[in-house]
Amino acid sequence: MSDTTIDPAFETLLHYLRRNRGFDFTGYKRASLQRRVQKRMSQVGVERYEDYIDYLEVHPDEFESLFDTILINVTSFFRDRPAWDYLGAEIIPQILAAKAKDEPIRVWSAGCAAGQEAYSVVMLFAEALGKEECIRRLKVYATDVDEKSLTQGRRAEYSPEAVEEVPQALREAYFERSGGYYVFAN
């Protein structure tokens, strides 16, 4: 089915998800969205979208599994390095120049998954401000629809593979080794 072909039953499911859980997937590419939903439906033994709505009504815990299937949590420290370099070299200095010396700085990391992007922001601001001033002034709001990922992000504990993209100097300055993991040191 192409993205231009509209399946009324699938659209009904999307409206149901928006109405009952506040998730609006109508902007997603239909073909990949349908594949992911159908994968979940197959796993629970449901063939039709109408029946899947009924299944969701009876099994509300299924919403979490469905959203985990739809929302692929792709995250890493300093993912898309040129964008982070630009943020550190151009944007953060402009933000700091526009703020009074003691004025708080607030950053929202939306869709933060397990927190790698949020902690990347913290490191860049700490480098620009110094750690003490960063702690005093910077407030990062990290949000995500995946509660398991948020819990992992709150622990701030990452595997050695997860911190590979963190430059060595930043890894040494902002992480502590603990039991085979790297823990972001506040």
Image (spheres, rainbow, N blue to C red):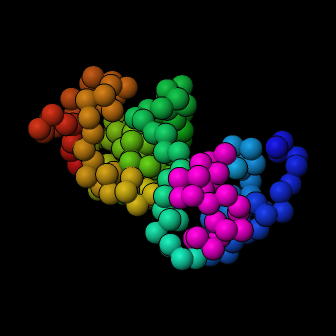
Q: Quadrant of residue 158?
A: top left
Residue 74: image x %, image y %?
Answer: 49, 40
Q: Quadrant of residue 106?
A: bottom left
The majority secondary structure of the magenta stretch comes to: helix
Which residue sits furthest top? 168
Give the camera-side residue of 165 and 28. 28
Residue 18: image x %, image y %?
Answer: 67, 69
Q: Seen in the image, is 4 located left or right of residue 152?
A: right
Can the viewer see residue 182 in this picture? Answer: yes
Relative to 16, say whether 97 is above or below: above
Residue at 71% across / 63% down in the picture? 49
Relative to 62, say whether 36 is above or below: above
Question: Residues in magenta?
Answer: 35-56
Residue at 44% across / 32% down in the picture? 78
Q: Is residue 37 magenta?
A: yes
Residue at 21% across / 29% down in the picture? 172
Q: So how many labels did they put on this image?
A: 0
Residue 56: image x %, image y %?
Answer: 57, 71
Q: Quadrant of residue 184?
A: top left
Can the viewer see residue 132 in this picture? Answer: no
Residue 16: image x %, image y %?
Answer: 69, 71
Residue at 12% across / 39% down in the picture? 178
Q: Seen in the image, is 129 located left or right of residue 110?
A: left
Q: Is residue 130 magenta?
A: no
Which residue sits furthest left? 179
Give the camera-side residue of 90 and 71. 71
Relative to 49, say whether 186 is above or below: above
Quadrant assignment for the N terminus: top right
Give the camera-side residue of 173 and 105. 173
